[in-house]
Amino acid sequence: MLNYLYADVFSLMDPVLLPQWLRGEVEGITVTRPLLFAAAVMMEVPIAMTLLSRLLPARPNRFANLGAAVFKTLAVVASLAAARPNVHAAFFATIEVVATVTIGVIAWRWRPEAELANTGG
């Protein structure tokens, strides 16, 4: 989650992007309230998963982590495809994809203790 935030903060420090943000159009994308709402929803996924991973029972937790990992991975890849990222954005995006793919793989392989006890594993 912090990686997503730092990527956005660094973009605000970019002397090419900052004037675009202030004009309301960044790399050909018009910044609208619905776009900002969509960005807020995107940021809520890792925030919610921090809480849900502690509160959900094992099976729903596994599926929530899988869903969140796939959703966030696809979102980052789509953002890379939509615009040519600068070096810092590509760096952050690479870390984000590696992290979300890793979460997805761990969730995919995860077997709750109850299942392991029933199979002798």
Image (tube, helix red, strand yellow):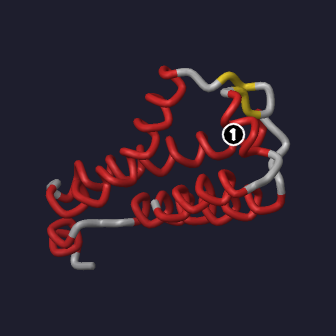
* Residue 20 drawn at (x, y percent): 75, 35
Image quadrant in which the N terminus is located: bottom left
The count of marks equals 1
Label 1: which residue?
Answer: 79
Q: Amino acid at mark 1?
A: Ser
Could you tell whether 83 is left or right of 21 in the image? right
72 horizontally vs 116: left or right: right
The residue lying at 66 percent from left, 60 percent from top is 10
In which quadrant is the C terminus drawn?
A: bottom left
Q: Nearer the viewer, residue 103 or 51?
A: 51
Residue 62 location in percent, x, y?
31, 55
Q: The residue tagged with tag 1: helix, strand or loop?
A: helix
Residue farthest to the bottom, as pictured = 121
**Image side of residue 35 versus residue 54, left or right:** right
Whether residue 19 sits left or right of residue 22 in the image: it is: right
- Neighbor class of circle 1 (other Cα within 10 Å; few <14, some 14-19, many 20+) is few
Percent x, y for residue 99?
Answer: 55, 65
Q: Nearer the viewer, residue 20 or 3?
A: 20
Establish if 113 lies above or below 86: below
Against 71, is 27 above or below? above
Residue drawn 72% across the image and 45% down it: 18
Residue at 67 percent of width and 62 percent of height: 92
Name the spot of residue 115 as percent of width and height, x first. Answer: 20, 66
